[in-house]
Image: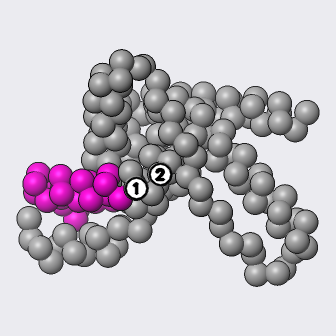
């Protein structure tokens, strides 16, 4: 693969891919490793194509690498489920257009949603992150994960239903 082309992809999509890796892993350290491995794998494969969606391809690589890492970890520790701590990434408050109380409530709601999304099974969490965080279309997600479009729609629906149910428990 052309080195200039890879630099272009890093500049164009690096921030989005890294942000996705942070949400996926729940840890900046693990995200750093996953991010680097994603681009190394893309370089090794050498089949990134501008006519396709390079961002979706890179995200698919990150998802596959993450799944493989989790499988290895589960085998080593003889555990089926691995729980990673939620990333400690408090965001700055808004520009002052709302009261401090409103800002705090909004930030608490964001943390709750992140926590609930993190608690979803991987197959649901990954499609939700790809759809909402990375603004990927359903067909792009299906292609990236090598699953039917109907399965992606079903998983998004299941995830939204579970999140809605869990949110109502917190509101009550």
Comparing 6 with 112, the one in front is 112
Q: Residue 83, how many percent across, how many down?
A: 51, 33
Q: Main secondary structure of the magenta part?
A: helix
The residue indicated by pointer 1 is: 29
Quarter of the image for the N terminus: give it: bottom left
Task: Find residue 93 and report its image quarter.
Answer: bottom right
Residue 140, placed above or below residue 29? above
**Label 2: few (<14), some (14–19) or many (≥20) C-alpha neighbours in 10 Å:** some
Asked where in the image residue 77 lies, by quadrant, the reply is top left
- The residue lying at 46 percent from left, 24 percent from top is 81
- Quadrant in the picture for the C terminus: top right
Q: Residue at x 78, y 54 (%)?
A: 108
Q: At which x and y percent is residue 32?
A: 35, 59
Q: Disc 2 marks which residue?
A: 27
Q: Which residues are magenta?
A: 32-55
Relative to 75, 105 lies left or right: right
Position of residue 68 relative to residue 113, above or below, is above
Callout 2 secondary element: loop
Left or right: residue 80 versus residue 37 is right
Mark 1 element type: helix
Q: Is residue 68 magenta?
A: no
Tell whether label 1 touches label 2 (CB within 8 Å).
yes
Of 88 and 1, which appears nearest the observer?
88
From the top left corner, tell me how far across and down residue 166 is, in percent.
75, 31
Q: Give the residue furthest to the front.
A: 77
Residue at (83, 63) in percent of width and height: 104
Q: Is residue 144 visible?
A: no
- Residue density around tag 1, few if under 14, some if 14–19, many if 20 or more, within 10 Å: few
């Amino acid at each position: 693969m052309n080195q200039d082309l890879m630099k272009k992809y890093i500049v164009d999509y690096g921030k989005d891919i890294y942000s996705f890796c942070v949400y996926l892993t729940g840890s900046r350290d693990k995200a750093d490793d996953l991010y680097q491995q994603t681009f190394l794998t893309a370089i090794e494969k050498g089949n990134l194509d501008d006519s396709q969606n390079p961002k979706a391809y890179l995200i698919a690589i990150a998802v596959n690498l993450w799944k493989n890492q989790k499988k290895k970890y589960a085998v080593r520790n003889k555990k089926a489920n691995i729980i990673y701590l939620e990333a400690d990434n408090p965001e700055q408050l808004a520009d002052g257009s709302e009261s401090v109380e409103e800002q705090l409530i909004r930030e608490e709601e964001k943390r709750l949603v992140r926590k609930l999304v993190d608690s979803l099974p991987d197959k649901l969490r990954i499609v939700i992150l790809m759809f909402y965080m990375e603004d990927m279309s359903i067909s792009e997600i299906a292609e990236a994960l090598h699953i039917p479009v109907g399965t992606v729609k079903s998983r998004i629906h299941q995830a939204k239903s579970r999140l809605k149910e869990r949110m109502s428990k917190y509101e009550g």
